[in-house]
Image: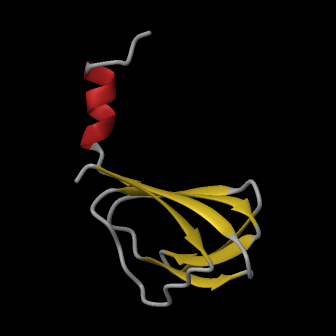
């Protein structure tokens, strides 16, 4: 799988993990706290973070009723857009 898109509500994963691809989180409403490569970060409504491949991270806390969009993709999907751009 090259692309995975999801929406989370009140999800907390206290177990550190990593992905083979890039991971993007956008907070639509509420807030969520992470530990990314050992560093704490809190995202609020309108904030986003891009986590590079194989970087250890975990969700440490999430405000009640937070709405988050997540996107995980492998780098080769970027090259497909460059080689085969979408035209209208």
Q: Residue at x 34, y 60 (%)?
A: 53
The image quarter containing residue 84 is top left
Colouring method of the image:
secondary structure
Give the residue at the far top of this rendering: 88
- In this view, 60 is above or below 52: below
The image quarter containing residue 29 is bottom right
Foreground residue, 19 or 64?
64
Across and down, in percent, residue 71 comes to 45, 54
Q: Residue at x 73, y 71 (%)?
A: 31
Q: Which residue is drawn at 70% across and 72% down?
A: 66
Q: Residue at x 55, y 69 (%)?
A: 8
Across and down, in percent, residue 51 comes to 47, 60
Across and down, in percent, residue 49 comes to 58, 58
- In this view, 73 is above or below 60: above
Give the residue at the far bottom of this rendering: 14
- In this view, 9 is above or below 75: below
Question: In the figure, is residue 42 to the left or right of 53?
Answer: right
Quarter of the image containing the N terminus? bottom left
- In this view, 17 is above or below 87: below
Across and down, in percent, residue 34 comes to 59, 77
Question: In the figure, is residue 50 to the left or right of 19?
Answer: right
Foreground residue, 29 or 36?
29
Question: In the figure, is residue 1 to the left or right of 39?
Answer: left
């Amino acid at each position: 799988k090259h692309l995975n898109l999801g929406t989370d509500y009140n999800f907390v994963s206290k177990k550190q993990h990593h992905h083979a691809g890039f991971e993007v989180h956008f907070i639509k409403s509420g807030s969520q706290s992470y530990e990314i490569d050992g560093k704490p970060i809190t995202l609020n409504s309108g904030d986003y973070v891009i986590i590079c491949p194989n970087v250890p991270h975990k969700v440490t806390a999430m405000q009640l009723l937070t709405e988050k969009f997540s996107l995980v993709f492998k780098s080769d999907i970027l090259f497909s857009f460059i080689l085969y751009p979408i035209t209208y």
